[in-house]
Amino acid sequence: MRLRYNYRVYPTPDQQEALARAFGCARVVFNDGLRARQAAWEGGLAYVSDGELSKRVITEAKKTPEREWLGEVSSVVLQQALADLNTAYRNFFNSLSGKRKGRTVGPPRFRSRKANRQTIRFTANARFKVLDNGRLRLPKIGDVVVRWSRALPADPSSVTIVKDATGRYFASFVVATTDAPLPAVEAEVGIDLGLTHFAVLSNGRKVAAPKFLRRAARKLRRLQQDVSRKQRGSNNRKKAVVKVAKAHATVADTRRDWQHKLSTEIIRDNQAVYVEDLCIVGLGRTRLAKSVHDAGWASFIAMLEYKAARAGRTFGKINRFTPTSQTCSRCDRIDGPKPLNVRTWTCPCGAVHDRDINAAINVLAAGRAERLNACGARVRPAPVPAPRREAGIHPNAARSTARTAEGIPTL
Ligand SMILES: [Zn+2]
């Protein structure tokens, strides 16, 4: 399985300049490529092949005075920017045709110079290298200092350099890891993504979003109000914007660490884990609950999925629309919609249900039923792509999460 390993890196001022140049060139190539595809589309011309596009916006462009400076950065970085564009188009077309499941994907958009997050990617054939002295050698950038919060388990196939909104730099390596199976356990669990709780488990456990996260979210809201009160274009506004970005980064890092601990624990304690598909969840949830938990749920589910695959556990998403909160988990009667303020209800069969725990039990039952399909054969698990950022850890929290950051505690 492919996993990402993230580390904080500290480029020197010169290297920062070189990186800025590379970010800029990658962006220009991406945008030139997008413009070329759009022009071909609007002009009713044939689809430009990936190879042809690369020749046009990289190789040929370098020979023109307007794009000569593209030669100053590693050509792999430029090719990878085009690869991103091609992937974005493929996702868009597959989403249109229904081949791609889940949320609808829009057409690629132009990359902005002012984007909060800038990235470039080096693949192995760019000959990036981790040196014996611990520095990361990047072609046409230099040897960059890395804070190795933990060791890389194998040679990485690519590295993405990220500059975030607060001006921090990260190196995100993709590494093929071997599976780390855990000893089998009896328990299986269904998870309801709750309204009042972050998650409710079929074994009766209710997990609230931690206080520190809610506190941080409140602080974030206040800082955002500060921004809107400052005059546009003023220095004070700029400062307030940076504060918001920093608070955002802290919330995201803290949430990720917390989710790593929770997901590792759930995978360790259960042989099978079932959750509702988020598209289904969206149907029955209010806007408020979505805004509170949405981002968190998606990354949490992604963590469960890849950790399960690595540990040899079963993971399943309930794709059918099952009214999990309306069905009695004892007699299967569908008792009709329950208003949100109804936390417990009694089924005519006599069972008294906690709304969320009952829903989680139904998720578990639906998951088991889906796994054992008509022939009793196991449903083949879908391939798990390298998660975008989930495997990473925040360097400041490296001590507290070193054991769980990888997802699976070492045996
Ligand atoms: Zn009942």
Image: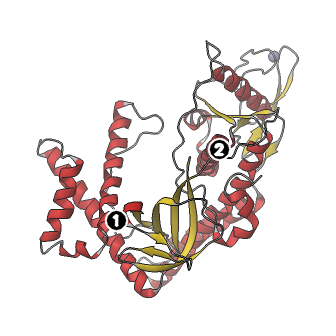
Say what amino acid the circle numbered 2 marks.
Arg
Say what amino acid the circle numbered 1 marks.
Val
Quarter of the image for residue 74 reads: bottom left
Residue plotted at (56% across, 80% down): 133
Is the residue 175 above or below the residue 101 in the image? below
Describe residue 37's horizontal placement relative to residue 272 as left or right: left
The answer to whether any part of residue 104 appears in the image is: yes
Q: Secondary structure at mark 1?
A: helix
Q: Secondary structure at mark 2?
A: helix
Q: CA distance from mark 2 to mark 1?
A: 30 Å
Front-lying residue, 88 or 387: 387
Per the image, the residue denoted by label 1 is 77
Describe residue 316's horizontal placement relative to residue 55 as left or right: right
Residue plotted at (48% across, 81% down): 11
Per the image, the residue denoted by label 2 is 310
Mark before the other along the chain sequence, 2 or 1? 1
Front-lying residue, 114 or 33: 33
The answer to whether any part of residue 244 appears in the image is: no
Q: Position of residue 406 (x, y in %)?
A: 66, 56
Q: Across the whole image, how many numbered discs are drawn on residues?
A: 2
Is the residue 318 above or below the residue 70 in the image? above
Front-lying residue, 258 or 74: 74
Q: Position of residue 151 (x, y in %)?
A: 63, 66
Residue placed furthest toward the bottom: 13
Circle 2/circle 1 CB separation < 8 Å: no
Quarter of the image for residue 81 reads: bottom left
Describe residue 34's horizontal placement relative to residue 3 as left or right: left
Q: Give the class, few, some or many, for how many residues have Cα within 10 Å of label 2's Cα (few <14, many ≥20).
A: many
Quadrant of the image where one finds ligand 1: top right
